[in-house]
Image (tube, grey):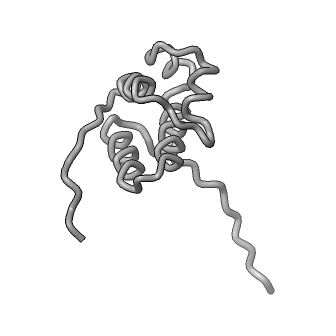
Amino acid sequence: MIMVSKTTPWDATDYLKTDDDIAEYLAAAFETGDIGDVTHALATIARARGMTETAKSAGLARGSLYKAIGEGANPTLSTLLSVLSAMNVTLSAKPKLAA
């Protein structure tokens, strides 16, 4: 007899409930140094918060937000800072640790 496990897709939006959750998730994306990871994290956070509300808070049209953080996007610094502010997080810098 073969045992079959039923699984459900994992969705990070289910776990992004607090500002701390969001900040940690986004920090991990920034640490990779990959713009694709960062824009994917931003899109995931925007879905968790609500795309329309995030766009409105960032001063963007909803379609512009999708374009700015969608797959293959490379948002301007101005757009990035607006979106981060809408997500109630800030961007900071620290020295890179020596390997």
Q: Residue at x 21, y 62 (%)?
A: 97
99 left or right, relative to 72: left
Looking at the rendering, in which quadrant would you find the C terminus?
bottom left
Residue 74, given in percent of the width and then of the height, sits at 53, 37
60 in relation to 28, above or below? above
Q: Which residue is drawn at 33% across and 41% down?
A: 23
Residue 25, given in percent of the width and then of the height, sits at 39, 47
43 in relation to 25, above or below? above
Q: Which residue is drawn at 40% across and 53% down?
A: 33
55 in relation to 3, above or below? above
**In the foreground, 41 or 10:** 41
Residue 20, given in percent of the width and then of the height, sits at 30, 40
94 in relation to 98, above or below? above
Residue 36, given in percent of the width and then of the height, sits at 53, 48
**In the foreground, 30 or 19:** 30
Q: Which residue is drawn at 55% across and 29% down?
A: 68
Quarter occupied by residue 90: top left
18 left or right, relative to 73: left
90 left or right, relative to 66: left
Quarter occupied by residue 87: top left
